[in-house]
Image (cartoon, helix red, strand yellow):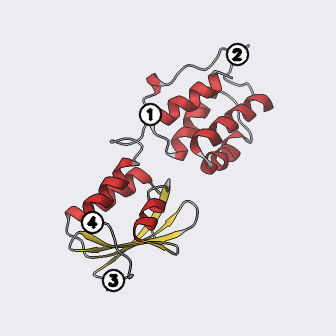
Amino acid sequence: MSNWILYDDFVDLVRNYHHDAYSGLITGVSDRQHSFQIGFDQGNIVLLNYRIKKGLAALQLISQVERVKISEHANSDIHDSGTEVPDTSTILSRLTANTLDDITGKTDISDVPAMPETRGSSSRRLVDSGLKKIIETAAIHHFGPIGAMVCEEHLAHAQGDVRALMLKIAQDVGASEADTKAFFQMVSGS
């Protein structure tokens, strides 16, 4: 099984399998620890399963994941699920419609709003509990449960540059540029 990859990279992978006329099965685990399968026959998607859901219902759930781990099973015998699968172009369009951005999801630091001025130097200052709560609330709001997990890790002994800390949190969750900006704006507006 691969390392975690972000949704945008997963969609690129599926597109590549289609364009490369791949035949076989890819299995995955979502960030919610749910398993799924996508079956290919000469690049055409012929099987979609997400837990017990199949076809269009599975596609809807797959298109909502944030991160996945993938394993590849080339030339696997794909068993007909008995459920109608949308055509490949519809599947790719649906997956692409939910991508965070078209390139990498990385944020240009110069585009991130500045944090509010605080008393004294922030280079050695501990982040107080009030600011931690604001950052965590904003992260959960914009990044979901993964935001809470990343905050738990980064905010335990947080000190120093709050802006750099928040950028690290956004990068670790794989946030899009728009989500990162909204995260910063929510914190700076508090």
Amino acid carrying mark 2 in the image: Thr
Amino acid carrying mark 3 in the image: Ile
133 to the left or right of 66: right
Which residue is the site of mark 3?
A: 78
Front position among marks 1 and 3: 3
The first of marks 3 and 2 along the sequence is 3
* Residue that appears at 66% across and 23% down: 123
* Residue that appears at 51% across and 36% down: 179
Which residue is the site of mark 2?
A: 118
Q: Are marks 3 and 4 in contact (CB under 8 Å)?
A: no
The first of marks 2 and 1 along the sequence is 1
* Residue that appears at 62% across and 45% down: 147
Amino acid carrying mark 4 in the image: Asp
Q: Look at the numbered disc 3 and give the secondary structure of its residue.
A: loop
Rendered image: mark on residue 25: none
Q: How crowded is mark 1: few (under 14 residues within 10 Å), some or many (20 or more)?
A: some
Q: Look at the numbered disc 2 and give the secondary structure of its residue.
A: loop
Front position among marks 3 and 4: 4
Rendered image: mark on residue 87: 4
The first of marks 4 and 1 along the sequence is 4
Image coordinates of residue 66 in percent, x first then y, are: 50, 53
